[in-house]
């Protein structure tokens, strides 16, 4: 499996949800190191369905295999993708040729759509995600193709920017380098190109769609977002999660439990305390599973931790990212060794154990297009404490007295800008305080946790919205 964040979860789960709605998806991915070995180990056969002698400097092939129901087409281009490091970085630095690597992926995506594959397949709609595939609609447009495209923006902060001197090399027309087309403040942005040239644009929550039209959240793309919103060509469709893979009743990584039989959750909690060498101090066990970046509000978290532990809370953090945040978290763990535990790294199984063991999952993001950890938290009964921004705002119902009374509350939120709030450490501390108080009321907590666990977080509704969008484009 290849994953740096939520995009992988979405691309992995949406196809299965679209299948029963009549939309079969093939997923084009780079063949990162080890992927063919993983497929072979699982007994998945791959077959070459396309090839070229020269993909931006080397030979390339697309190999198809169906793995766990996912119809994969892997772009086998060793000069671009078979190298040490992660998908985008090596030793903490971007691969210097990321623009070439992902322009190549996009170019191949467009060629497959135009030419079809050796096994006689051609898509009716091309759905592209983020800056990595942002050039597909442009390549199709410059080739004169009318195949409809949908561009989904998962995070506008990553824009795929490179210099105009690269246009020729990437088979993009220099004549279209101007501000109404490929140019973005003197550079080229693959994200902008996609948002401009795709037939339709979606993003991963309704609130984020509106936020993208503002200078605060638009990261320079607010004009373009406003234009596509005003024309009715951009919408927000919430992410769901794969509720089969993420089910505390059947998850092999955890002691089984469910909303109706929650007893097993306590064993997971005890095991997690032990795993992080923590001692219960009477308050909730908070978990955080995240990339450690500015987006995720890790500095706010660090500021709020002392108050939370003073009130009896314990906290376990799993993440990796900016060294400054890693250091600050390590420092807190040193100060509160039996109440703060930090694990720097990326560990899928551990993340499952954290949602299963946690009483709350904390997500203090400054912006969050959708966010998935609050959804996994709800499903596993780790009640979310979130900043009211983007998808966090759309997926968590704050535990006000009214919402608690009528059973609609699913978590705690703070800092809703639309209500005059701000996402800051004070707001987070206050929300953690409210969660800690309610946690001490065992019955009220059990009710809230059960409401969170039974909230609809699967792909059903959202997949139907994508299917509707695709159908509208082909009819
Ligand atoms: P983003 O895509 O912005 O990183 P999301 O909340 O959409 O945020 O998705 C994050 C995904 O990555 C979730 O599936 C989460 O469980 C997972 N994740 C993040 N950090 C880690 C980690 N250190 N170890 C394991 N899983 C992680
Ligand atoms: C991005 C966003 C996150 C979203 C994920 C999947 O990485 O930061 O909010 O959930 O994509 O759409």
Image: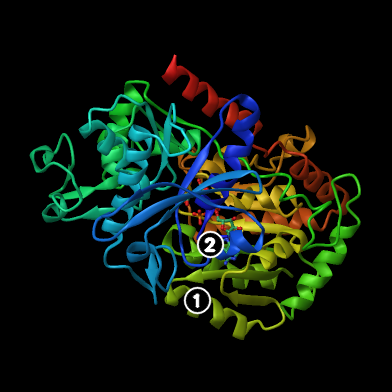
In the image, 348: left or right of 426? right
Task: In the rendered view, tell whether residue 83 sits above or below residue 119.
Answer: below
Picture quarter with the N terminus: bottom right
Is residue 58 in view from this perspective? Answer: yes
Residue 441 drawn at (x, y percent): 84, 53
Is residue 156 in view from this perspective? Answer: no
* In this rendering, the label closer to the viewer, 1 or 2: 2
CA separation in Å, label 1 and label 2:
29 Å
Q: Nearer the viewer, residue 23 or 398?
A: 23
Residue 374 drawn at (x, y percent): 63, 50
Task: In the rendered view, tell whether residue 238 sits above or below residue 229.
Answer: below
Residue 326's mark? 1
Q: Nearer the viewer, residue 171 or 225?
A: 171
Query: What residue is rendered at 69% in x and 40% in y?
Result: 400
Task: First in sequence, mark 1 or 2: give its number.
Answer: 2
Query: What residue is rendered at 61% in x and 76% in y?
Result: 343
Query: What residue is rendered at 31% in x and 58% in y?
Result: 59
In the image, 54: left or right of 61? left
Residue 35's mark? 2
| CB under 8 Å between discs 1 and 2 | no
Query: What residue is rendered at 32% in x and 34% in y?
Result: 225
> Which element type, helix, strand or loop, lies under badge 1?
helix
């Amino acid at each position: 499996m290849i994953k740096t964040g939520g995009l992988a979860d979405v691309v992995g789960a949406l196809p299965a949800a679209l299948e029963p709605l009549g939309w079969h998806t093939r997923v084009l991915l780079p063949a990162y190191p080890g992927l063919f070995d993983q497929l072979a180990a699982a007994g998945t056969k791959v077959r070459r369905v396309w090839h070229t002698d020269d993909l931006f400097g080397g030979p390339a092939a697309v190999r198809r295999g169906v793995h766990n129901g996912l119809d994969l087409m892997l772009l086998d281009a060793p000069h671009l993708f078979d190298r040490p490091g992660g998908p985008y970085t090596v030793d903490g630095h971007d691969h210097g040729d990321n623009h070439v690597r992902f322009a190549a992926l996009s170019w191949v995506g467009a060629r497959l759509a135009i030419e079809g594959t050796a096994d006689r397949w051609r898509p009716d709609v091309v759905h592209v995600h983020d800056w990595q595939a942002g050039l597909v609609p442009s390549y199709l447009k410059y080739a004169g193709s009318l195949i409809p495209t949908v561009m989904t923006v998962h995070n506008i902060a990553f824009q795929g920017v490179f210099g105009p001197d690269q246009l020729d090399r990437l088979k993009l027309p220099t004549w279209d380098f101007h501000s109404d087309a490929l140019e973005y403040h003197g550079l080229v942005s693959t994200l902008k190109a996609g948002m401009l040239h795709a037939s339709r644009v979606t993003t991963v929550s309704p609130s984020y769609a509106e936020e993208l039209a503002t200078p605060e959240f638009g990261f320079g793309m607010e004009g373009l977002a406003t234009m596509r919103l005003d024309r009715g060509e951009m919408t927000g469709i919430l992410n769901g999660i794969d509720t089969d893979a993420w089910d505390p009743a059947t998850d092999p990584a955890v002691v089984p439990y469910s909303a109706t039989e929650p007893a097993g959750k306590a064993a997971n909690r005890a095991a997690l305390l032990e795993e992080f060498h923590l001692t219960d101090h009477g308050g909730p066990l908070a978990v955080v599973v995240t990339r450690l970046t500015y987006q995720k509000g890790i500095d706010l978290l660090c500021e709020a931790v002392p108050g939370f532990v003073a009130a009896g809370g314990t906290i376990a953090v799993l993440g990796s990212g900016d060294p400054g945040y890693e250091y600050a978290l390590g420092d807190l763990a040193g100060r509160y060794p039996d109440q703060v535990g930090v694990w720097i790294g990326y560990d899928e199984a551990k993340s499952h154990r954290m949602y299963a063991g946690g009483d709350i999952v904390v997500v203090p993001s400054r912006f969050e297009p959708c966010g998935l950890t609050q959804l996994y938290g709800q499903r596993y009964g780790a009640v979310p404490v979130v900043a009211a921004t983007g998808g966090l705002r759309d997926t968590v119902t704050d535990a006000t007295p009214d919402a608690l009374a009528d059973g609609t509350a699913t978590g705690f939120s703070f800092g809703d800008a639309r209500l005059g709030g701000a996402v800051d450490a004070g707001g987070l501390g206050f929300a953690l305080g409210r969660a800690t108080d309610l946690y001490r009321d065992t019955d009220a907590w059990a009710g809230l946790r059960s409401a969170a666990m039974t909230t609809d977080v699967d792909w059903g509704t959202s997949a139907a919205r994508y299917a509707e969008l695709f159908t509208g484009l082909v009819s």
